[in-house]
Amino acid sequence: MSDFEFFDLFPNIYQLHLPIPKNPLKYLNSYFIKGKNFNLIIDCGLNHNEVEKILFAAIEELNFSPSNTKLLLTHCHSDHSGLSVKLNEYGIIVLVEPTELKVINDPFIWEKESEALKSLGVPEDILEQAKETQVAYKFRPKGEIKFYYPLKDGERLDLGNFVFQAIHTPGHTRGHICLYDEDHKILFSGDHILKDITPNISQFYEHELALDSYLKSLDKIKDLDVKLVLPGHRTHFFDLKTRIKELKDHHQKRLKEVLDIVKNNPGLTPFEVASYMSWDINYSSWEDFPPTQKWFATEEAYAHLKYLVINGTIKEEKDKIKRFYYS
Ligand SMILES: [Zn+2]
């Protein structure tokens, strides 16, 4: 039996910490909810031996059998979905938003993302190292989720003692889902809203507008009556409105920073813009950033650049491979 601890944050809601090795996030918050009609697990951690032991020990401890338990994924990232295929094989149905399911079940998704990052100016050796060292790649779900229910915006999950509403909140990923219980005023915020970390907004598909979607998704939930926010990482919190305001302010500051960088250094790629940005991370210089962090930083820079391009504030030019920005 693996050592684990449940944190009781609310009657019948148990929080379980699933480790994320070598990552500043430290662990994923998985939630186990004891329902009258069925039980619900929200997010399931990396596809890693230790994590698997903890997860299955927790399932056993609470007596969650496959026939009366469902797994809901807030989004496709491996720290949330890693063990979904294994739980699926164990007989647990997966509730997952369709675009997220597509990403999880696409065996070539990493190659596609890696290819897209070349156009952002990330050197190939960094891409290769980032892929190899990335826990999200190493411990991704392997195989396919076959037994699932496609979760859509507004869908209700009636557990008897809790009634959850799925809220589509694109931004962190395209199909990100939050869960809201109106009676108990509880919001499971996934990685849409975290307390002391700003969720990474990555943009890598040409046609999407990650930051624009993200800001709209913050507005979408800002007026919900919420007393307890249960996020995908780190601590729970109570004041949703203040946190949303802080996140919006953060991105406005970021947009200004990116605009200034482009004005002062015309013709940079997103990778180069990222190297000029300030990052809240413990490395003294951009050169010291691990390849994975350079990857995330570049995607984040690109999300802000794209937003400024769409608003007509800056211009994008492309050669055969890369994108460049001018004010
Ligand atoms: Zn996460």
Image (cartoon, helix red, strand yellow):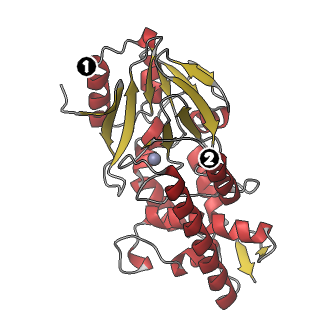
Of residue 82 and residue 314, the one placed in the foreground of this image is 314
Image coordinates of residue 295 in percent, x first then y, are: 51, 63
Of residue 129 and residue 36, the one placed in the foreground of this image is 36
Q: Is residue 326 visible?
A: yes
Which residue position is annotated with label 1?
Answer: 61
- Residues at badges 1 and 2 in contact (C-beta under 8 Å)? no
Image coordinates of residue 315 in percent, x first then y, are: 79, 76
Query: Residue at the spot x=50%, y=35% of the render?
Result: 185
Type of the residue with mark 2: Asp
- Mark 2 surroundings: few (<14), some (14-19) or many (≥20) residues within 10 A: few
Residue labelled 2 has its Cβ within 8 Å of some atom of ligand 1: no
Label at residue 169: none
Q: Is residue 319 left or right of residue 129?
A: right
Q: Is residue 199 visible?
A: no
Q: Secondary structure at mark 2?
A: loop
Of residue 30 and residue 126, the one placed in the foreground of this image is 30
Image coordinates of residue 89 in percent, x first then y, are: 45, 18
Q: Is residue 220 left or right of residue 11?
A: right
Which residue position is annotated with label 2?
Answer: 223
Q: Earlier in the sequence, mark 1 or mark 2?
A: 1
Type of the residue with mark 1: Glu
* Quadrant holding the C terminus: bottom right
Q: Is residue 84 left or right of residue 158?
A: left
1 or 2: mark nearer the eye: 2
